[in-house]
C-alpha cells in the first residue's frame, strides 16, 4: 500500500468511528529517541523518515510538524503526498491545535492514541482544542496497517557490577532514601534507559541503544520488572532474583497499576508516562520530588567505575578514528588527482569504513546512533545521512563532516570531526576557527556548584556570534553509560534547563555552524563534570575532556586563537606543538 492509500485507510477508519481528526506522533509508549518499527505509524503514513515529527490527519487534509533539523529532508520526502509541512519555531507556523481548529470550524472529535501521549499532553490538548472533543483511543493501526512489523523482544544480558560499579539492591535503596516517602509507595519507571541502569541489564530491543523493552515498579523491598519473561536467560533471572527483582509479563503493567490501591502513593519517575497508565494508577499520585527526576539524576551522576569505562571507550574508539583519518589522508587528500577521479570514495564508503575499523575491537557492540558522514553542502544538514542508494561523492576540496559514536561494553562514545579534503575558502577557515574556539572555551570553563548548562552555553556560541553566525541546536547533551547516546536530564543549550551540573555527569561539547549550500562545521568532544577546588564560598567544578581523537588544524586561522586556547589544545594532545 502506498502512502496515499495508507491515509485513505486511516480516513475510512476515522469516518467509521466518528473521528474528525487524528494526531499521530513519533512516539512509542516509552517515549525514547529511537522507536521500534512496530510504532513507526507516522512514518508509514507520511513517508517522512526523520526521528521527530507529528502528523495530523483530518477527513480532507493533513499536515506534519517538525523542527529545523529536518526542514530540507521533510520538504523532499513529503513531496507528492499532499501533506503540508509545518516548520516549528518559524514565524507564521500555526500550532497543532490552531491548525486543527481552522480545519474543523464546525466542531468534531480529535483522537489520540492513549499509549503514545503523556497524561500532561492529553490535558494540554483538552484545553487547547476546546470546544472540540478530545478522545483517547486504543491503537488503531493493527486494523489498517497490513504487514505491520511486530513488537520484537530479544535476549537480555546483565551489566556486571565490575562494569556498573553498583548492585541493584544498592541502587534501589539509594533511590528509596532519596524519595523520602514515609508511607507505602510505588515508584513507576517507564523510561527504558532508567530501567536498564537501575536493574543492571542491557539488551538490543531498540536500534542503536542497548535497551530492554520493559517497565518497572519500585517499592521499599523489591523491584517488579515487567518484560518478556522468555527473553531473560536463567543466569540473568538468577542474578535479578538475588537483587530482589521479580520478573512478570510486559503487558501486565496497567493491571498492576490498577491494583495498587488508593492508599498507596504513586510516583512516576518522569512525566513521560502514557495517559493510559497514568490514569490507571488512580488517585494519590505525587510528583517526583527531584528536579529532572530522582532516578534519572542518579543515573546521570556516573560513579568512578562508570567513568573509567567511559575513558576506556574513548581510548578504544580513538584507535578506529585514527585509522580512519589516516585512510582519508592516503586515499583522498594525498591521492593523485587523476587516480582519484577514476575511483572516488563516497560518504557511505567512509561510514562503512569507520564501522569496519571499530569492529576490530572485541568490545564493540555497534553504533550509538546513525552515522552522519556529510561532504560539503551536505554538512549544512545537521542530521544528514548517506545511504547505500543515496550519497555524495567526496572531492579533493572542502570539508567532510563526520559525526559518529559507538557502543562498547563499558561505555558509549559520540564524536564529531570536520576534516579538510583539500583547498578551503577563507570563509570556511574562519568558520572552522570560530567553532574550534567555542569548543575550546567551553572546555576550559570553571564554575561554581549550582551552575546550569544554559549559563555556560554562551562560551561555545560567543565566537560564532562575533561572526554574525549561530546554530540552532544545543551545545551539549548527556551521554549514557553503555546506554543512550542522548541522555537527560542535564544539558548545555540556550534554552533554560533547571537541572544543575554535578560531578560525574558526562556531556557532549559540540558547537557548530551551517552555511546552506556550502558547508557545515561541527567539532565535538565528550566532557565530564569534575571537582576543581573548594573556594571561600563553596565548591567549584571544571570539565575533563576524555575524547582522544585528533582535531584537524590545517584550517585554523591561528591569529584568532588566544595563547590560552592554543595551550589547551596542545596540553590535551589535539595539536603536536603550540603554534607561535
Image (tube, rainbow, N blue to C red):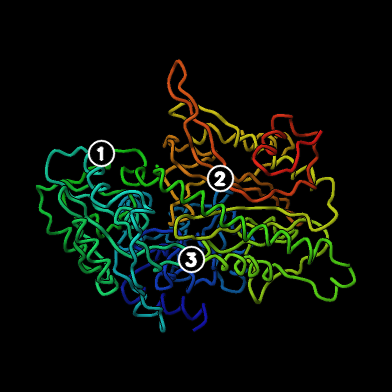
Quote the CA–CA distance across marks 3 and 2. Answer: 20 Å
Q: Is residue 382 visible?
A: yes
Q: Quadrant of residue 562?
A: top right
Packing grade of label 2 (10 A; few <14, some 14-19, many >=20) is many
Numbered mark located on residue 546 in the image: 2
> In the image, what residue occupies the spot 39% across and 66% down?
22
Q: Is residue 475 left or right of residue 266?
A: right
Q: CA distance from mark 1 to mark 3?
A: 33 Å
> Which quadrant of the view contains residue 563?
top right
Residue at the image point whose x is 21% and y is 62% from the top: 254
Label 1 environment density (alpha carbons within 10 Å; few <14, some 14–19, many ≥20): some
How many residues crowd mark 3 within 10 Å: few (<14), some (14–19), many (20+)?
Answer: some
Between residues 336 and 344, which one lies in front from this camera angle?
Answer: 336
Q: Which of label 2 and label 1 is nearer to you? A: 2
Rendered-image quadrant of the C terminus: top right
Closer to the camera, 25 or 320? 320
The label number, if any, that marks residue 138 in the structure image:
none
Q: Which residue is mark 3?
A: 365
Instruction: Indicate which disc, 1 or 3, sits on the residue closer to the N terminus.
Output: 1
Q: Secondary structure at mark 3?
A: strand
**For residue 433, which quarter of the picture?**
top right
Which mark, residue 178?
1
Amino acid at each position: 500500500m502506498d502512502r496515499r492509500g495508507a491515509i485513505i485507510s486511516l480516513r475510512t477508519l476515522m469516518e467509521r468511528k466518528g473521528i474528525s481528526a487524528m494526531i499521530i506522533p513519533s512516539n512509542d509508549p516509552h517515549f525514547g529517541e529511537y522507536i521500534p518499527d512496530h510504532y513507526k505509524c507516522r512514518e508509514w503514513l507520511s513517508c517522512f523518515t526523520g526521528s521527530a515529527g507529528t502528523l495530523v490527519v483530518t477527513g480532507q487534509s493533513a499536515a506534519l510538524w517538525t523542527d529545523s533539523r529536518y526542514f530540507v529532508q521533510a520538504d523532499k520526502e513529503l513531496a507528492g503526498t499532499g501533506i503540508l509541512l509545518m516548520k516549528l519555531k518559524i514565524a507564521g507556523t500555526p500550532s497543532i491545535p490552531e491548525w486543527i481548529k481552522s480545519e474543523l470550524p464546525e466542531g468534531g472529535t480529535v483522537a489520540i492514541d492513549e499509549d503514545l501521549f503523556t497524561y500532561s499532553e492529553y490535558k494540554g490538548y483538552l484545553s487547547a482544542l476546546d470546544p472540540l472533543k478530545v478522545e483517547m483511543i486504543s491503537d488503531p493501526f493493527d486494523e489498517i496497517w497490513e504487514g505491520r512489523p511486530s513488537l520484537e523482544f530479544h535476549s537480555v544480558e546483565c551489566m556486571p557490577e565490575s562494569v556498573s560499579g553498583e548492585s541493584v539492591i544498592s541502587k534501589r535503596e539509594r533511590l528509596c532514601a532519596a524519595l523520602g516517602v514515609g508511607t507505602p509507595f510505588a515508584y513507576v519507571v517507564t523510561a527504558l534507559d532508567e530501567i536498564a541502569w537501575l536493574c543492571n541489564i542491557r539488551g538490543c530491543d531498540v536500534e542503536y541503544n542497548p535497551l530492554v523493552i520493559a517497565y518497572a515498579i519500585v517499592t521499599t523491598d523489591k523491584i517488579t520488572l515487567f518484560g518478556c519473561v522468555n527473553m531473560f536467560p536463567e543466569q540473568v533471572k538468577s542474578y535479578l532474583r538475588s537483587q530482589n527483582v521479580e520478573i512478570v509479563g510486559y503487558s501486565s503493567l496497567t493491571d498492576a497499576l490498577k491494583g495498587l490501591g488508593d492508599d498507596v502513593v504513586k510516583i512516576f519517575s518522569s512525566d513521560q508516562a502514557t495517559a493510559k497508565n497514568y490514569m490507571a494508577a488512580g488517585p494519590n499520585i505525587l510528583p517526583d520530588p527531584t528536579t529532572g527526576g530522582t532516578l534519572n539524576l542518579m543515573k546521570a551522576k556516573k560513579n568512578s567505575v562508570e567513568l573509567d569505562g567511559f575513558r576506556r571507550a574513548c581510548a578504544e574508539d580513538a584507535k578506529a578514528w585514527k585509522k580512519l583519518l589516516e585512510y582519508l589522508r592516503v586515499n583522498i587528500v594525498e591521492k593523485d588527482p587523476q587516480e582519484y577521479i577514476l575511483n572516488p570514495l563516497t560518504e557511505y564508503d567512509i561510514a562503512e569504513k569507520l564501522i569496519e575499523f571499530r569492529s576490530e575491537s572485541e568490545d564493540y557492540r555497534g553504533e550509538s546512533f546513525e552515522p552522519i558522514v556529510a561532504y560539503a553542502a551536505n554538512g549544512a544538514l545537521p542530521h544528514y545521512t548517506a545511504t547505500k542508494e543515496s550519497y555524495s561523492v567526496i572531492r579533493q576540496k572542502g570539508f567532510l563532516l563526520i559525526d559518529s559514536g559507538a557502543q562498547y561494553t563499558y561505555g558509549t562514545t559520540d564524536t564529531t570531526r570536520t576534516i579538510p579534503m583539500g583547498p578551503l575558502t577563507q570563509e570556511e577557515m574562519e568558520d572552522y576557527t570560530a567553532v574550534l574556539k567555542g569548543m575550546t572555551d567551553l572546555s576550559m570553563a570553571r564554575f561554581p556548584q549550582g551552575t546550569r548548562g544554559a549559563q555556560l552555553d554562551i562560551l561555545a556560541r560567543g565566537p560564532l556570534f562575533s561572526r554574525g553566525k549561530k546554530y540552532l541546536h544545543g551545545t551539549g547533551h548527556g551521554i549514557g553509560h553503555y546506554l543512550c547516546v542522548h541522555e537527560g536530564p542535564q544539558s548545555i543549550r540556550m534554552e533554560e534547563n533547571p537541572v544543575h551540573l554535578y560531578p560525574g555527569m558526562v556531556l557532549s561539547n559540540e558547537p557548530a555552524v551551517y552555511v546552506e549550500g556550502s558547508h557545515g562545521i561541527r567539532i565535538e568532544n565528550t566532557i565530564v563534570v569534575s571537582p576543581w577546588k573548594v573556594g571561600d564560598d563553596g565548591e567549584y567544578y571544571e570539565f575533563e575532556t576524555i575524547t582522544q581523537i585528533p582535531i584537524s588544524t590545517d584550517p585554523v586561522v591561528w591569529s584568532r586563537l588566544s595563547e590560552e586556547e592554543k595551550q589547551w589544545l596542545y596540553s590535551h594532545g589535539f595539536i603536536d606543538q603550540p603554534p607561535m
